[in-house]
Image (cartoon, rainbow, N blue to C red):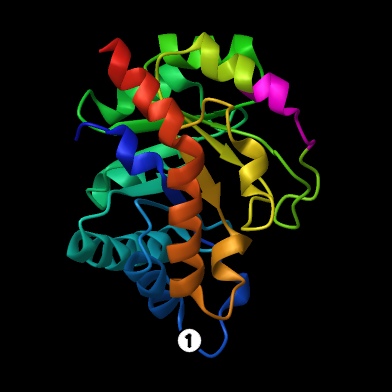
Amino acid sequence: MKLERKNMCLYAVTDRSWVGEKSFLEQLEDSLKGGVTLLQLREKNLSRVEFLKEAQEVKKLTDKYGVPLIINDDVEIALLADAAGVHVGQKDMEAGEARKKLGADKILGVSCRTVEAAKRAEQMGADYLGVGAMFATSTKTEAEVITKERLMSICQAVSIPVVAIGGIKEENIEALKGSGISGVAVISGIYAQKDIEGACQRLLKLSKDITKEEAEEKCEKC
């Protein structure tokens, strides 16, 4: 499928750490009801059989809301589940290899932290980039925070959409305004919240506000 910048506005990355009163799928549905525009299924502790089964279930849910499903790291699972695409980290799989396995019709996202890595990922066929961590995060405690200036440099160096990730929540999202991003990727700012649907509604509005000027500028250049 063709990736559109509007799909990047509020990018949810799943984490079952906060499953409690509601099931994992119920939490995902709440986020989709709240306006998530892209959803990445991320599982580090499931067997591949369990991961595939879950991916197929989540795909039915994302299809219901017309939201593209991205699988974290695993190209084979993405293809078997007929997901919209896959996201790989710098240590997981080289972007060119992932593109070759995916084919031309699937979305490929790549994590990067430098301008050089961003340019290389775009050349190798990435459709979008995930850049961070922008703020300290409990999800990846080892992740080094990068500056807004570096984020801006990456956005200026590539023509594909860039989403900021890492510790993003309602209280700090406005600090990313003017960076050139197409949206934000959020984990705990969504799934650690008691009212997931409400949190997504607020984050979507805030993300649209901080990316509006960038979108208008790109439209003027078209």
Residue type indicated by callout 1:
Lys
Left or right, 41 with respect to 221, comes to right
Residue drawn at x 44%, y 26% is: 214
Q: What element carries label 1?
A: loop
Residue 199 visible, this orientation: yes
The magenta-colored residue range is: 144-151
Where residue 75 sits in the image (x, y, percent)? 37, 39
Residue wearing tag 1: 22
- The count of marks equals 1
Where, quadrant-wise, is the N terminus in this rendering? top left
Say if 120 sits above or below 211 in the image. above
Residue at the spot 64% in from the left edge and 24% down from the top edge: 151
- Residue 10 is situated, as x and y percent measured from the top left of the image, at 43, 50
Image height check: is 116 above or below 217? above
Residue 82: x %, y % from top left: 22, 48
Closer to the camera, 170 or 130? 170
Q: Tell me which residue sits at (37%, 46%) in the image.
A: 70
Closer to the camera in the image, 100 or 175: 175
Relative side of 86 to 104, left or right:
right
Q: Is residue 105 magenta?
A: no
